[in-house]
Image (cartoon, rainbow, N blue to C red):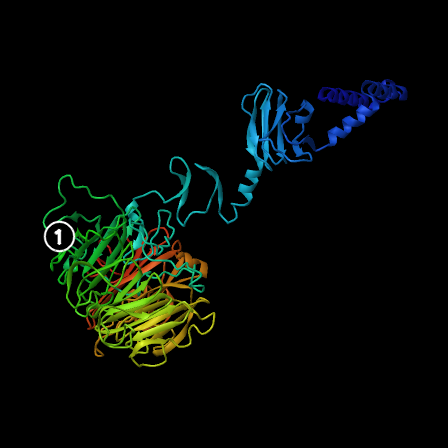
């Protein structure tokens, strides 16, 4: 038919040529009629019309009768169509598949299988047919002997239309087939791991890119995505740290809003004149003052150190043939005199002050190198570690390890029963809290030597133990508790503790979005519109009374002078109350608040950090300042990305701005290079304040691409700068 069609087209063309000639050679009417009659005689009038009708059809329709067992043989004309539609006849199909035998010639067509059974297409000599699933389209090609399945049209359309739903998505083929590749994290580039397309970190030294700052409780995977944690009991090590609130049944106003039960604890300064960071490759750097050996350098130097050496005993490395597990660091935790590193395999190592057993090695000796803390044989791997020394120059710390299985172990200073072991005796080795049995999901501690701790269990109840002189535990008394006591039956979302020199107070959020406070209240830091000490939980006034003002996050800082708190409500607003002697609340004045006040120009905050130590004498100098990490919208806050550090309070290098007024009573943006403005993930601070006019507060920021910035004074390499020079504006650290 195709050959005849070509012949007719040639005759038609010749006839048009003859008709267009003028003069002597022009065709006569008789010639043209003769030509038309000749064509009609060759094919017949009906055949000519059928030929024209067939040529105008867009697809070839092939009807397959039920039950589909009969072989259907196609002609050359049928496979010459662009589309071949295989449709079912009436009746049920019981065959496993329907066989189509195509001509052994060159052709290409899209086969649309409308049958309820697979379609198998082959040539007469082909052994293995090509299958097209029911309801799918396949673009087939025949080279004259074999039919090949070139492309699954339906799958391609689905992959291109459905998976690529988000801006920046890519369509790739990996080991599992055609797949959607979501846009990569900031500062990553599209490359390959040798087999599949991947978003990769930029080339360069792995230890130049930081994953965690010190005292961070939000774990991240290799692709820089937060690991949500989870409260499930695990008998093996995991990479998780804190818990993302995801239970929408128990916490409908908090689930999946980026609320972490541990996060950066109360956001307080905790490291003395220095800081630390964990790199993308699992190594770390500790820098700053080497008091008590806290930076793990046996030489006692202050400058930055990398990949600390690990020791088996106080005078020897690990034995011949003894294998150290090759495991990355997932947490670096530090306070005034002690530093701990936690590996992803659940092993915990410590260095620094140990006068009350803080090193967990059975002694009361300090060390200047990292040595593993050995837990009892029936203890599982460690999930994360916290301590009571979150503020002030205090080494009398109690330590708590939350285990993967939900148990809690404690050791160190226990003068007020803060270890929760039922007595007031110090412990030099980790000891299990008998009050809990694989049911703790969060620990928050504070108070320094007047330490106290709160525990949130897997059934969302709140317990407390330790110093309680100002009612900060919230059990209705001022008696210290050597074993955990129930504070609230819940459900409790999150707790925040702070304090120094016995002036302790605490907050917790309940599932209904209301905020409760207890403890010391001299500056109105409890937010209940009074300065009255509270031994039992009291409602923080005005917040949580409407849907939009339900509290979703809380931060507490300081102790006696300079103490205060901040809260984030469901509508993204940021509230402050407490002492405001240096304008650190960012409210535009230096007037303290006894009830929450809306902070202007600040919304969607994910972090609060303050080097305010809470010194306990009214005659002492008070260098109170606060740094917050705000975001442009709720989505960025939830994802912990693209933040903008802002500072307020006592004007100094910590403010990160030139010519900072003293005090700075409204939050001001810290200055960053254009590449990093609005590209900060986490913030931190360290400091020193001896109660006189000596004050050294430093600030740190982790950018999305792993760069760390630092600013403030630098007396003992506290900024991680090899030249030991301070800076008013953020400077990138050169590890």
Q: Which residue is found at the position 67% from the left and 31% from the top?
A: 65
* Of 154 and 726, the residue lying toward us: 154
Is residue 45 toward the left or the right of residue 124 in the image?
right
The N terminus lies in quadrant: top right
User: What secondary structure is found at the residue carrying circle 1?
Assistant: loop
Indicate the quadrant where residue 140 lies. top right
Give x and y (percent) for residue 613: 24, 69
Disc 1: CA contacts within 10 A as few (<14), some (14-19) or many (>=20): few
Residue 158 against residue 19 in the figure, above or below: below
Say whether residue 579 is visible: no
Residue 551: give x, y in percent of width and height: 41, 69
Residue at the spot 62% in from the left edge and 24% down from the top edge? 101
Determine whether 454 is above or below 367 in the image. Answer: below
- The residue singled out by tag 1 in the image is 299
Given residues 549 and 700, the one toward you in this image is 549
Q: Position of residue 384 (x, y in %)?
A: 27, 56
x, y percentage for residue 605?
39, 64
Specify whether 663 is left or right of 352.
right
Residue 695 visible? The answer is yes
Residue at the right extreme, as displayed:
30
Image height check: is 322 above or below 73? Answer: below
């Amino acid at each position: 038919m195709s050959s005849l069609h070509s012949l007719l087209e040639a005759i038609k063309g010749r006839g048009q040529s003859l008709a267009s000639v003028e003069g002597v050679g022009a065709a006569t009417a008789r010639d043209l009629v003769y030509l038309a009659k000749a064509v009609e005689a060759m094919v017949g009038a009906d055949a000519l019309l059928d030929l024209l009708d067939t040529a105008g059809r867009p697809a070839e329709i092939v009807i397959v009768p039920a039950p589909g067992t009969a072989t259907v043989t196609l002609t050359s004309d049928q496979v010459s169509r662009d589309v071949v539609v295989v449709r079912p006849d009436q009746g049920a199909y019981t065959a496993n598949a329907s066989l189509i035998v195509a001509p052994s010639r060159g052709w290409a067509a899209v086969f649309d299988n409308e049958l309820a059974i697979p379609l198998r297409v082959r040539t007469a000599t082909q052994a293995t047919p090509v299958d097209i699933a029911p309801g799918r389209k396949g673009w087939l090609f025949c080279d004259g002997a074999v039919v090949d399945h070139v492309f699954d049209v339906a799958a391609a359309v689905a992959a291109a239309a459905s998976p690529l739903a988000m801006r920046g998505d890519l369509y790739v083929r990996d080991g599992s087939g055609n797949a959607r590749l979501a846009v990569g994290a900031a500062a990553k580039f599209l490359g390959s791991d040798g087999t599949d397309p991947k978003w990769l970190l930029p080339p360069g030294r792995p230890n130049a890119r930081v994953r965690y700052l010190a005292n961070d409780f939000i774990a991240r995977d290799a692709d820089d995505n937060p690991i949500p944690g989870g409260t499930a009991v695990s008998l093996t090590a995991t990479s998780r740290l804190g818990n993302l609130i995801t239970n929408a049944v128990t916490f409908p106003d908090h689930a999946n809003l980026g609320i972490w039960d541990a996060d950066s604890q109360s956001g307080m300064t905790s490291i003395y004149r220095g800081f630390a960071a964990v790199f993308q490759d699992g190594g770390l750097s500790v820098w700053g003052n080497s008091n008590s050996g806290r930076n793990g350098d046996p030489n006692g130097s202050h400058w930055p150190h990398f990949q600390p050496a690990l020791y088996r005993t106080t005078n020897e490395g690990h034995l011949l043939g003894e294998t150290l597990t090759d495991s990355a660091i997932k947490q670096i935790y530090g306070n005034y005199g002690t530093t701990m590193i936690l590996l992803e395999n659940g092993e915990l190592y410590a260095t620094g002050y140990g006068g009350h057993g803080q090193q967990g090695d059975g002694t009361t000796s300090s060390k200047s190198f990292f040595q593993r803390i050995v837990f009892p044989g029936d203890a599982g791997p460690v999930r994360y570690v916290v301590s009571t020394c979150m503020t002030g120059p205090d080494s009398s710390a109690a330590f708590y390890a939350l285990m993967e299985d939900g148990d809690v172990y404690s050791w160190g200073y226990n003068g007020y029963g803060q270890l929760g072991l039922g007595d007031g005796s110090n412990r030099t080795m980790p000891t299990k809290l008998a009050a809990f049995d694989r049911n703790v999901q969060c620990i928050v501690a504070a108070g320094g030597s007047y330490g106290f701790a709160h525990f949130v269990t897997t059934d969302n109840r709140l317990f407390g133990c330790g110093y309680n002189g100002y009612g900060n535990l919230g059990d209705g008394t001022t008696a210290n508790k050597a074993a955990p006591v129930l504070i609230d039956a819940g459900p409790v979302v999150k707790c925040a503790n702070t304090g120094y020199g016995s002036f302790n107070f605490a907050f917790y959020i309940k599932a209904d979005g209301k905020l409760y406070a207890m403890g010391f209240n001299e500056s109105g830091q409890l937010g209940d519109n009074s300065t009255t000490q509270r031994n039992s939980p009291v409602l923080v006034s005005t917040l949580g009374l409407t849907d939009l003002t339900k509290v979703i996050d809380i931060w507490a800082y300081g102790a006696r002078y300079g103490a205060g708190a901040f809260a984030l409500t469901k509508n993204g607003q940021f509230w402050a109350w407490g002492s405001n002697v240096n304008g650190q609340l960012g409210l535009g004045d230096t007037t303290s608040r006894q009830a929450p006040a809306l902070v202007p120009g600040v919304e969607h905050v994910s972090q609060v950090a303050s080097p305010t130590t809470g010194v306990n004498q009214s005659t002492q100098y008070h260098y109170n300042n606060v740094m917050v990490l705000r975001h442009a919208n709720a989505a960025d806050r939830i994802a912990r990305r693209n933040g903008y550090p802002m500072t307020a309070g006592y004007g100094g290098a910590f403010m990160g701005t030139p010519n900072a007024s003293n005090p700075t009573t409204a939050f001001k943006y810290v200055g960053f290079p254009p590449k990093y403005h609005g590209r900060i993930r986490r913030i931190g601070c360290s400091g020193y304040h001896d109660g006189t006019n000596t004050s050294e507060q430093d600030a740190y920021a982790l950018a999305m691409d792993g760069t760390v910035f630092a600013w403030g004074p630098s007396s003992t390499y506290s900024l991680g700068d090899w030249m030991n020079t301070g800076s008013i504006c953020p400077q990138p650290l050169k590890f």
